[in-house]
Image: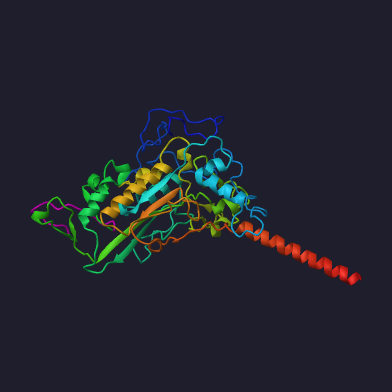
Amino acid sequence: MPGGGVWSAQPARPGPVPVDPVPVDQVLQRATSTDPGPVGPGSVGPGSVGLGPVGPGSVGLGPVGPGSVGLGSVGPGSVGPGSVGPGPAARVRQDAEAMDPAAASGYLDPPARVGFFTDTSICIGCKACEVACKEWNGVPEDGLCLTGMSYDNTGGLSADTWRHVAFIEQRVPHGADRPDASAAASAGGAAAAGGDRGAGEAQGAVPIEGQLVVPRVAQGSTPVQGQQAVPAEAQGAAPVVAQPGLRWLMASDVCKHCTRAACLDVCPTGALFRTEFGTVVVQQDVCNGCGYCIPACPFGVIGQRSGDGRAWKCTLCYDRLTVGMEPACAKACPTQSIQFGVLDELRERADRRLVDLHRAGVSDARLYGRNPADGVGGGGAFMLLLDEPEVYGLPPDPVVTTADLAAMWRRVALAATALAAAGVAAFAGRRR
């Protein structure tokens, strides 16, 4: 963390013994000898991780910070008299969460909040993140059948899919005013890891708008099927896609680890808690399978496992974070489409990336979940999209589903009071 501190929210809690520093966007400054090494494509096969699956309860490390469940903060009285929106107490809580949700949950001197920035403009749909997530966390397979609509075999996030790569096929009118491929490629040069190297440069390919990555074709060579050779006068520029009327949108989706998480508000057992890193984790040994968190999530992230009944979702590899390691999905991503780091730094990097894409003519590019003033207080995991959120199956304007809970309790209390008063009045009238 900044200043070289060890990643620990509580000084009295024993932490890992740091060894050689490992630069991971200057966030993970210390790693431990338990790190099995890269989880890149080809190394995520069975047994390659070496530490075994993360079983139930293993993510429940450390105490649950006071107030992490959130019950009571939405009770009657938190809304001012006659007020429809949140009252002063609720606004103070929301402001505190926006600044540091871990501190608002009761952690003393927590580390900087971390998260994911997923740049879908350089996602190639390889599903290495899905495989790495399942391998490290011991997530069971969830069906190996294609949906019939695309090359997607998982369909969406669920208890058995904590990372989901969407394949969205779009038909673009021929001759439509689309950004020049070379412009998009030049914008992609600084996309990965804060601009150290572009995915296209690293892989010998150029990212085309819509995530179709095509290798450069040398002069005089035979083009690969589905590609067109680059004319001699255009050598050094991006290749031309043979089918301009079709594009792929690929995006790796995950739990957003919301700043104002409704799942925390509704969990009756404290199984869902806020970690010292600002993430949201389910403790499987505490979950009673009530399922309240499932409809509470505005993104449909959480699911109940068949035959188990308990809720499961992404933990942002909490067990890895506590020992100074990068989440498995980000480590496995070959194009660095999934970037992990301090959330404030990721937001600045995403802002720069968006400016670059707009300058390159990709006017539809937008950030999703980046704004701390949105309905969930901003996400700990946010994305850069190339089209409307609905195209990716995401809600356009997500709102924490417990936002009106305080007002609802207040109205219930008023209704109960009025009913009791009416009953007393009726009883008194009869006695006369």
Check the image and tell me how it is coloured: rainbow
Q: Is residue 406 left or right of residue 314?
A: right
Q: Residue at x 33, y 47 (%)?
A: 352
Q: Which residues are magenta?
A: 210-224
**x, y (%) of residue 407?**
63, 59
Percent position of residue 332, x then y: 35, 45
- Is residue 44 positioned above or below 33 on the image? below
Q: Nearer the viewer, residue 225 or 342?
A: 342
Q: Is residue 199 left or right of residue 163?
A: left
Give residue 177's quadrant in the image.
bottom left
The structure residue drawn at horizontal position 86% and vertical position 68%, both measured from the top left corner, is 427
| Magenta segment main secondary structure | loop
Could you tell me residue 137's position as x and y percent? Answer: 45, 46
Q: Nearer the viewer, residue 427 or 122?
A: 427
Question: Is residue 215 at least partly visible in the picture?
Answer: yes
Magenta-drawn stretch contains 211: yes
Q: Position of residue 14 (x, y in %)?
A: 53, 30
State the image quarter where residue 296 is shown: bottom right
- Classify 271 as above or below 248: above
Residue 45 appears in the rendering: no
Locate the N terminus by quadrant.
top left
